[in-house]
Image (cartoon, rainbow, N blue to C red):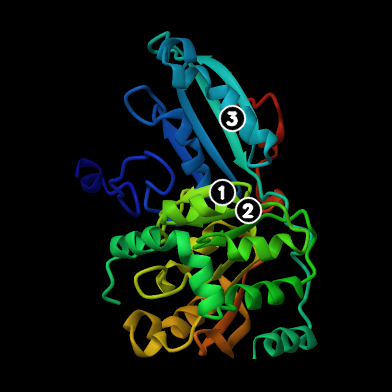
Amino acid sequence: RRLQALRLYRNHICRAVDGILSTGLREETYDVVITAGGFAADAINPLDVTEMLRILKPEGHLLWTMKTVKDEGTAAFSSFDANLNGLQRAGRCKVIKRKQFVDSDTNSVGVFYLVQRLVGSLPDYVNMEIPSELKKQISDILVDTSDPLNSVKFYDDWCDKYDEDLVIVGNYTGHIKCVEAFVKLGLNRNITILDLAAGTGLLGTEVGKHGYENVDGLDASLGMLGQARKQATYRDYIVAMVDGLGSIPINDETYDVVMSSNGFAPGQIYPTAIPEILRIMRPGGYLLWTMREGYQQRSQKFALLDAEIKDLENTGSAELVVGPVIFDNFVLEHPGKFYMLRKTPRHHVAYTQEDQPADLHSPNHPHMN
């Protein structure tokens, strides 16, 4: 409140920096983030530098001063530079300056850091245009009161007979339709894929038949994932419920493709979760899913699905590539619906190289001695 009285800032945000998405701020919000003494044993943990980089625009700068690692004396600070170097090797940031200084008033020693968030390498398919003929081919292939915890228990109890009941008895084809559409994209076999609401691994197995090996599975049911693990379907197995921002325990821009068959349903994954799914996708990546047709008549949230997608297009977050396509025999002779979204293949850069002061690029910045 004292800061508000001084009217120094445009906005005043009272949030602790404590993990990914802890600030509550959108990704790529600021050109510059500055903190003096914020990194400290009783304040911001060094590991949370990733959250501060997240809210920076690509090519934006993070500047801070702090005590020396020796003076902080904690294990977290002992590995601070190693963590920064790891982020640098991964192409997430560039450490432009790291320099000790002496405070002339207190004679205490501190460290100054200047770090730049990097744009990051874009996938090789990012500029690939999908011709109208291919969109037609994909379309031709295909031609809210539930308690989520109850849903998880239901699938845990069903996991042993899920494949038999759904595929053999129910004539379930949703996973096949989804993979058939994906394969038409012709993406490289080295891309990373997430099967969302993976269940026992039906979709993951189908993808594997086409030579894609970097496939992870995520599901809220531990029992379902246990069945998939018996068949070694996935590279990694992730237990999580997909809901709002931060609900998926995965870093930003991790996957090239996210697919889901029968995951979007009342009591499971709702349309409002799409921004969270887009968060974990690389720019230009694809989100494909099949679902049962008719949920819009039973659930207000699903009645707004097409409006949610339109909003994402209007804000430049994603593009609807194909859909909605209605196809027959999703399960038990009920029709299904298919969508393909593409995450916008661009970064919002903080400022151009020409806009940056020349002395920022010098390893011996004259303003800090």
- Which disc, if any, is residue 84? 3
Between residues 325 and 328, which one lies in front from this camera angle?
Answer: 328
Q: For residue 100, which numbered disc appears in the image?
A: none
Q: Which residue is the site of mark 1?
A: 229
Circle 2 sits on which residue?
233
Query: Which mark is nearer the camera, 2 or 3?
Result: 2
Residue type pointed to by label 1: Arg
Residue drawn at x 44%, y 81% is 305
Residue 192 shown left or right of residue 199 in the figure: right
State the image quarter where residue 317 is shown: bottom right
**Mark 1 surroundings: few (<14), some (14-19) or many (≥20) residues within 10 A:** some
Q: Would you say the residues marked 1 and 3 are in contact, meaning their CB atoms lie under 8 Å apart?
A: no
Classify mark 2: helix, strand or loop: loop
Give the quadrant of the C terminus. top right
Q: What percent of the width, then of the height, locates residue 219?
A: 47, 57
Note whether 118 is above or below 164 in the view shown: above
Amino acid type, mark 2: Thr
Q: Quadrant of residue 295?
A: bottom left
Q: Residue at x 58, y 46 (%)?
A: 236
Q: Give SS at disc 1.
A: helix
Near-viewer residue (181 or 93): 181
Point out residue 156 in the picture as x, y percentages from the top left corner: 39, 58
Q: Residue at x 69, y 34 (%)?
A: 89
Alpha carbons under labels 2 and 1: distance apart = 6 Å
Q: Position of residue 5 (x, y in %)?
A: 21, 47
Alpha-carbon distance for marks 2 and 3?
34 Å
Mark 3 crowd level (few <14, some 14–19, many ≥20, 10 Å Cα): many
Tags 2 and 1 in contact by the CB under 8 Å rule? yes
